[in-house]
Image: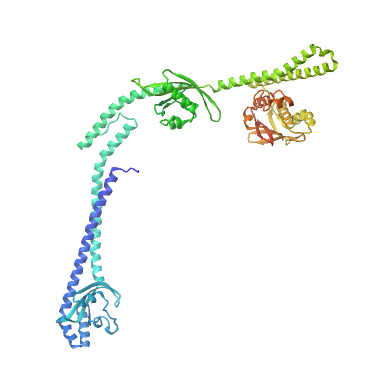
Amino acid sequence: MRRRKLIWQLFPPFLLITFLALLATTLYVTKHWRQLYLDQLTATLLKLARLHESQVRELLLQGNGNRLQEITQSFGQQTDIRFSVFRPTGQVLADSEYDPARMENHADRPEIKEALQGRTGIATRRSFTLDERMIYLALPVKDGERIVGIIRTALPVTTMDTTLWGIYVKILVGSIGIVLLAAAFIFFITRRLSRPLTAINQGAERFARGDLSSKVPVPHAEELAKLAESLNHMAAQLDERFRTILQQRQEQEAILASMVEGVVAVDNNDRLITLNKAGARLLMVNPEAAKGQSIQEVIRNKDLQRFLQQARTAALPVEGEIVINGLSERFLQLHGTKLLDSQGQAIGVLLVMNDVTAMRRLERVRRDFVANVSHELRTPITSIKGFVETLQAGAIHEPDNAEQFLQIIARQADRLNQIIEDLLTLSRIEQEEEEGTVPLSLEPLQPVLQAAIQTSEVKAAAKQIHIVLKCPNGFQAKINPPLLEEAVVNLIDNAVKYSPPQTTVTVEVERAPEKVLIRVRDQGRGIAMEHLPRLFERFYRVDPSRSRRVGGTGLGLAIVKHIAQAHNGWVTVDSTLGQGSVFTLHLPQET
């Protein structure tokens, strides 16, 4: 609801009351005057009608219509009042202002109807004959109890209206003057009343803003003076308490804001009491918007709710770990304990959270790497050992078998050597990337891509796969040609390995805002969505059994990833099952 000042709450109602009182008085007076004027006119018309009643009765009884018309016109000229004489049937016998022979029967006129009942008829209406608003008085003319005719006198209402309108204008001017004087007086009174209240309100607003040093002025009115003194006394007490509370709060907020651990405090109804910046960041919520809300509304996590319940019922502090799912998984280590008040009563739960996501990811990567590298090395080593034992058992004396076994041992040794070389290459690229020693220079892309295609053409030709290059002349980027060639070779080799025969692998270059895109597009079977986030990890294979059949060490895409990072870029993959995959190198464009 919109708020208004006190003066505007008091002034309009008082002014409206004054106006309505004047309006009611004016309406009553004007109505009374109009009625009084009408009564005076009616009395005049009646007096004139009675004045000529006897003469008209005599002429009516004689049936002297001509004489009746003459005296009627004479009456009208002498008094400026319209006179008319009617038969009891409503026929006009005489009229002071119009030819009676041309006038219609007036039996349906209201004043005539009333007169025919033996009463004096009065009506105010528009005259059909004169087309003017008139006041009519009809007096029955009797001979004994018999009505022998009707005398009607009439005056235009215009004269009365003109007179009354002059009176109305004077009343209106006087009323406006009275209203203006009353408005000025009411405004003065209400303003005088509202000023001390405004001063008290301004002082209270200063107190609300924390300015407790100033005082509220004390007015002369006893009631308002007590209010102002009470506010000043309250401000002095609050100032002292606020200083103590503010100091404690600042110390507490400084401690909480400086903590790298997230701190969450909830009451017994699981509503948030405190949430520091680190806690809001870990839970990915707005601390201001979340305060006072239920923890279930802020973050929907069953493990967190279960841990809160456990901490609330446990006698000793508890520890645990939960996973927060969002754009990426977050692993949070929790320490929970009861929150106690000054009397030792449990009023909620206090949680301290630590982000151990990086640690858990490193543990998983290390675990996966150890498992994968052990698996990759164990296969060729097991094969070599098995065939060596077979040769030692006597197969060395069988020339055909011995030759075949030695070829297998040589292939497995080459595979071991390739894994070691890829690991060394990856380690070297990572080291140069961390040290920032990878030399980059502005070079054309087309020669580097053509060299990569030539390196892969032999493998592609074996499967009748055609490699197409789409690179306009003049495309340049800040690159290390040998490393970029190695990355593109790895991408083309992957495309050739996992594409069916007689298909096409396309290498294309596109300029985008502030970067150059190098795409390697194949027509293979595609990669499922769940494998894409981990595709560039060491030794990660979408289909391990099939990958070993087609060759490779499982390190090619990891090498591509680190070569892209060494160029201050990155690599992405888009894939659709049954339609193929597109690997894209994003390299910064030289500006």
Taking depth in this image into account, of 329 and 11 the one nearest to the observer is 329
Q: Position of residue 567 (x, y in %)?
A: 66, 27
Quarter of the figure that contains the C terminus: top right
Q: Is residue 80 visible?
A: no
Q: How many marks?
A: 0
Q: Tell whether 535 sits left or right of 288.
A: right
Quarter of the figure that contains the N terminus: top left
Q: Position of residue 423 (x, y in %)?
A: 69, 19
Q: Tell whether 61 sits left or right of 392.
A: left
Q: Is residue 228 visible?
A: yes
Residue 252: image quadrant is top left
Q: Which residue is found at the position 24% from the left and 42% from the top? A: 193
Q: Residue furthest right?
A: 399
Q: Which residue is found at the position 69% from the left and 36% from the top? A: 578
Residue 554: image quadrant is top right
Taking depth in this image into account, of 537 and 237 the one nearest to the observer is 537
Q: Position of residue 529 (x, y in %)?
A: 63, 32
Q: Which residue is found at the position 25% from the left and 38% from the top? A: 196
Q: Position of residue 213 (x, y in %)?
A: 30, 28
Taking depth in this image into account, of 355 and 53 the one nearest to the observer is 355
Q: Is residue 71 above or below residue 480?
A: below
